[in-house]
């Protein structure tokens, strides 16, 4: 076998193995989807983000959307920021994973909703053998300026950049 044929065979083997960061483990389907629901509710006298948020995932350049519903809080602005990769039981430094980063909502009125669109702006790791999993913050505030960064939820929400 020539050297070029050997290289092509290795690349084909890697591609055929399904090694994709947009999947969760070997042979499993994508768990992330292109939209997530985010709910704002009053809890113990404070507006909070419901900790149950869908998982996001997709290919580089693929769209993602957060569907925000303000159930009973005063009008709020929402920010999505600080994407950190899961690494050996902890999380790394913030990385640029989504474009725009951070991304902000319009004012979400009481009993109202808003949609926030972005796209995956990072290639997945197709030779690392595992998914790249990123956690991010969802922050809310009654004022748009400075951008919301104080009242935050760090949900178990993951973004898997794929190919």
Image (cartoon, rainbow, N blue to C red):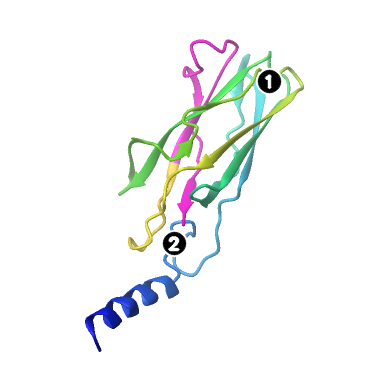
Question: Residue 20's mark?
Answer: 2
The residue drawn where x is 58% and y is 44% is: 63
Would you place residue 126 above or below residue 48 in this image?
A: below
In terms of image quadrants, where is residue 97?
top left
- From the image, tell me which residue sits under label 1: 108
Percent x, y for residue 106?
64, 20
- Nearest the camera: 117 or 50? 117
The residue drawn where x is 66% and y is 17% is: 107
Q: Is residue 74 left or right of residue 120?
A: right
Q: Is residue 137 left or right of residue 143?
A: left
**Secondary structure type for disc 2:** loop
Q: CA distance from mark 2 to mark 1?
A: 36 Å
Contact? badges 2 and 1 (CB < 8 Å): no
Q: Within the magenta stretch, is there residue 144?
A: yes
**Secondary structure type for disc 1:** loop
Q: Which residue ends up furthest to the bottom in the rendered image?
A: 1
- Neighbor class of circle 2 (other Cα within 10 Å; few <14, some 14-19, many 20+) is many
Percent x, y for residue 144?
56, 13
Among numbered discs 2 and 1, the one appearing first in the sequence? 2
Would you place residue 131 above or below residue 146 in this image?
A: below
The residue drawn where x is 74% and y is 17% is: 110
Q: Which residue ends up furthest to the left in the rendered image?
A: 3
């Amino acid at each position: 076998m020539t050297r070029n044929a050997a290289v092509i065979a290795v690349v084909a083997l890697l591609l055929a193995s399904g090694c994709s960061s947009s999947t969760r483990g070997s042979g499993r389907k994508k768990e992330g989807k292109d939209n997530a629901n985010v709910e704002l509710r009053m809890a113990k006298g404070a507006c909070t983000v419901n900790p149950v948020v869908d998982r996001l995932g997709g290919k580089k350049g693929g769209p993602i959307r957060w569907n925000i519903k303000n159930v009973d809080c005063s009008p709020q602005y929402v920010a999505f920021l600080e994407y950190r990769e899961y690494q050996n039981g902890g999380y790394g430094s913030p990385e640029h994973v989504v474009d725009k980063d951070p991304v902000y909502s319009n004012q979400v009125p009481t009993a109202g909703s808003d949609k926030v669109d972005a796209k995956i702006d990072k290639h997945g790791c197709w030779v690392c053998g595992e998914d790249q999993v990123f956690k991010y913050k969802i922050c809310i505030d009654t004022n748009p300026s400075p951008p919301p960064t104080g009242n935050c939820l760090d949900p178990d929400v993951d973004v898997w950049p794929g190919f």
